[in-house]
Amino acid sequence: MPKIELPPTKSSLRKIKEDLAFAYEGYDLLNQKREILAIEIVKHISEIKRVEANLLNALDELYRAYRLSAVDMGSDAVTMKSCCEKRGYFFHISTTKLLGLKLTGIRLSLKRPRLTCSLNQTSATYDKAKRQSRKVLLELGEYATITKAIVMLSREMKKVQRRVNALEKIFIPQHEEAKKYISDRIEEMEREEVFVKKLIRQRASDR
């Protein structure tokens, strides 16, 4: 007996065939979506490797510049001076749609650096660290955008995979089994009906 309990009638068979046709169509569409998501994830992973390498290099240069400025000015003086700095960038957020997903894009545009006044004198190494920090900000924006996209695409990939597995391993096999059972029962009942009609005609002719 199939797991789907339906009366063995032609209307039940027609309903199961319609459900199966819809399931197969959805299965094909989900497979196509899964392939597109996989291609996008691979593309973003190749991009993030490049961006991550650039970000690490920029951070290393920033750390070296900070250490030199700390040696020249002292770490406390560098901290006090950095607290006087004003925000030197604009923060932009945009969204792009892909297969029903809204991917967030982060972009930073740098302002022109302004002169700030403080009690501490700066050195050339501090100015270099300040310039390098602005470069790091740009790399961080690109890195955050790609990372967020990979996370969202991976989550959507898992959802699609679960739906594909549900159709492939549960829904379609159960409905195929039910379709076969109902088809066999209908054929059996039709044969019985034909046999009964022949038997009735035979008895009527014998009389």
Image (tube, rainbow, N blue to C red):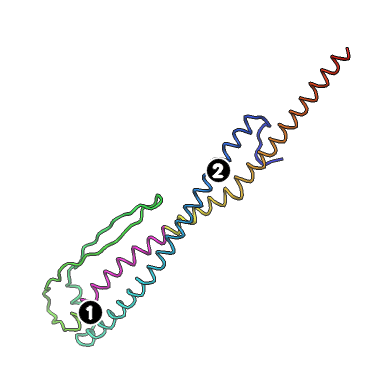
**Residue found farthest to the right:** 206
Label 1 or label 2, whichever lies nearer to me, is 2
Callout 1 amino acid? Ala
Tell me what residue is drawn at x 45 percent, y 56 percent: 36
- The tag on residue 23 is 2
| Residue at left offset 51%, top offset 52% | 31
Q: How far from the left and from the top, in percent, is residue 123? A: 16, 84
**Is 118 or 158 nearer to us in this picture?**
158
Specify the amino acid type for callout 2.
Ala
Q: Residues within 10 Å of mark 1 (few under 14, many from 20)?
A: many
The magenta region covers 129-152
Task: Where is residue 82? Give x, y as percent.
Answer: 20, 75
Q: Position of residue 188 (x, y in %)?
A: 75, 32
Q: Position of residue 27 (x, y in %)?
A: 53, 48
Check the image and name the residue furthest to the bottom: 71
- Residue 12 among those drawn in magenta: no
Specify whether residue 142 is painted magenta.
yes
**For mark 1, what is the residue?**
129
Disc nearer the start of the sequence (1/2): 2
Q: Nearer the viewer, residue 117 or 101?
A: 101
Q: Is residue 153 above or below residue 197?
A: below
Q: Are marks 1 and 2 in contact (CB under 8 Å)?
A: no
Q: Quadrant of residue 48?
A: bottom left
